[in-house]
Image (cartoon, rainbow, N blue to C red):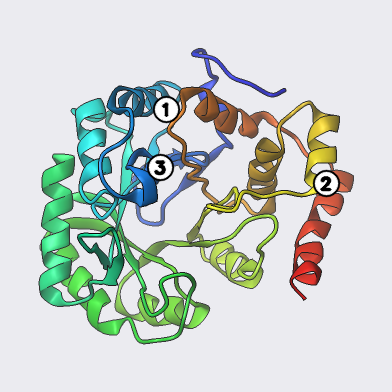
Amino acid sequence: MATNDNTTNKTKLGGRFPFPGASSSVHRIGYGAMQLAGPGVFGPPKDRDAALAVLREAVAAGVNHIDTSDFYGPHTTNQLIREALHPYPDDLVIGTKLGARRGEDGSWFPAFSREELTRAVHDNLRNLGLDVLEVVNLRAMFDIHEPAEGSIEEPLTVLAELQQKGFIRHIGLSNVTPKQVEEGRRIAPIVCVQNLYNIANRRDDGLIDSLAAQGIAYVPFFPLGGFTPLQSSTLSDVADQLGATPMQVALAWLLHRSPNILLIPGTSSVAHLRENLAAGELTLSPETLKKLGSIAATAVTAKH
């Protein structure tokens, strides 16, 4: 099994990628903080000390790109990040998301108004203990579960204004269609796009290639399948051959898929974190990549 320890070689986290217009680059394997909140991404963590330990271990292992949002909890993950890591390392990039709010029962609602977006920026700044947010992703909420068409001009213009005021350094988009990406790029420079994508769900293949040609990062969420973990006999067979776990192979495939892909796998376990980071050490041969490439076609056939 490809595992890791506290002496993780910081050069092996999938290589590096520079955000457009940024003065530094990030390791391609980062960390997603969503799972640090309670069940349903709502409320406090089951084990606060364990959550803090995962964050500290990630940074100690060389992770310098953390994905979060103040609507995780809400407020929970940002406050954990601040407690665990502040004052932050100079090279740490924290990316957050706006565009949603939580109900008292944990439900999700769009939050696209000027007032809601402005309040969310200041909530993120306060809970993270920052003067400026490095990357802010606008999450489209025309459909909560997947990208759906609708104009993002009004909310993105608000973020562009907040960027001009110095509260935001870079802007990204989340849960968007190619058409919305193009609309967004006419309003403000876009440094990254976050969408659902993994070895079994490849709807964004064309978008990834287009973004790569423009030097824009693509950050797949649910790279391991999310709430329905990836299960594939092909994936398991390849993992056995490589002495790795299926999830490590799924992450390694994403790194091989395109050089602009940045990973943010989430976990609340230090052991699982180390497994995820070790995926950057796997090398997949052309034959193996071809075999893994059949998984998406099998998944589509199974749905029909």
Amino acid type at mark 1 = Ala
Gap between marks 1 and 3, in whole Å?
Answer: 14 Å
Q: Which residue is drawn at 66% across and 29% down?
A: 281
Of the 4 image quadrants, the one containing the C terminus is bottom right
Q: Along the polypeptide, which appears first: circle 3 or circle 2?
A: 3
Nearer to us of marks 1 and 3 is 3
Viewed as shown, does residue 281 lie left or right of 37?
Answer: right
Above or below, 214 relative to 286: below
Of the 4 image quadrants, the one containing the N terminus is top right
Question: Which element carries disc 3, helix, strand or loop?
Answer: helix
Residue at the disc numbered 2: 233
Classed neighbour count for the residue bearing mark 3: other residues with Cα under 10 Å, few (<14), some (14–19), many (≥20): many
Gap between marks 3 and 2, in whole Å?
Answer: 26 Å
Q: Can residue 131 be seen in this view?
A: no
Residue 153 position, x and y percent, is 29, 83
Residue at the disc numbered 3: 35
Q: Along the polypeptide, which appears first: circle 1 or circle 2?
A: 1
Residue at the disc numbered 1: 58
Q: Which residue is drawn at 68% across and 45% down?
A: 250
Q: Residue at x 49, y 77 (%)?
A: 177
